[in-house]
Amino acid sequence: MFAQKGVELIQELERAKDFLPPFNEDGVRQVLEEMRALFEENQRDASSAVAGESEYITSVHIRHCALERNKRCLMAYLYNRLERIKEHRWHFGSVLPADIKANICEPEAQFFMKYNKSLAAYMKSIG
């Protein structure tokens, strides 16, 4: 089924409301591979549709909708992880516990450090 892996990412995050689960790099990679395959199929069929073969238009539209859904799922997954990281910053302070650090990927760790610096600069500026 189209976009099933993206939905699974969201469900995984939803099941873990009380903690931040490990970053699912494999799941994200699978969603991106599915998107790449759908895009390539759409390019091929769109070329045929432009050439006058109208039977491809429906399949192009369905795959495009699946691409959009996958994109929304990935964005929601990443956004919600970053929101949880921000919540952890407010809850635990500028140093994350080891169990949370183990569950974040390198870009998320960099985001945490930048968010921490921005927050410290803001707090310093207001006194």
Image (cartoon, rainbow, N blue to C red):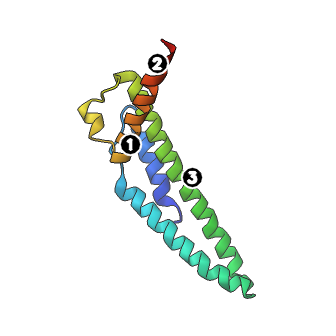
Which SS class for mark 3? helix
Q: CA distance from mark 1 to mark 2?
A: 22 Å
Crowd band around label 2 with a 10 angstrom C-alpha radius: few (<14), some (14–19), many (20+): few
Task: Give the mark, 3 or 1, whose residue is nearer the N terminus.
Answer: 3
Point 30% across, 30% down: residue = 96
Can you name the residue that lies furthest to the front here? 125
Which label is found at residue 39? none
User: What residue is disc 3 on?
Assistant: 72
Q: Residues within 10 Å of mark 1 (few under 14, many from 20)?
A: some
Residue at 28% x, 37% y: name it.
101
Task: Indicate which label's residue lies in the foreground, 3 or 1.
Answer: 1
Write down the residue under mark 2.
123
Q: Are marks 1 and 2 in contact (CB under 8 Å)?
A: no
Any part of residue 43 in sight: yes
Say which label, 1 or 2, has the lower sequence index: 1
Residue 93 vertical placement versus 99 (above, below) = above
Q: Marks 2 and 3, Cα distance to the nearest angstrom?
A: 33 Å
Residue type at mark 1: give it. Glu
Q: Earlier in the sequence, mark 2 or mark 3?
A: 3
Percent coordinates x, y for residue 71 in the rendering: 55, 56
- Disc 1, SS: helix
Q: Which sits in the foreground, 101 or 72?
A: 101
| Nearer-the-camera pick, 46 or 7 | 46
Identity, as a three-letter code, of the amino acid under mark 2: Met
Looking at the picture, tell me which residue is in the foreground, 4 or 44: 44
Residue 42 is situated, as x and y percent measured from the top left of the image, at 60, 75
Residue located beneath label 1 in the image: 108
Question: Disc 3 versus disc 1: distance between alpha carbons?
Answer: 19 Å
> Could you tell me if residue 17 is visible in this image?
no
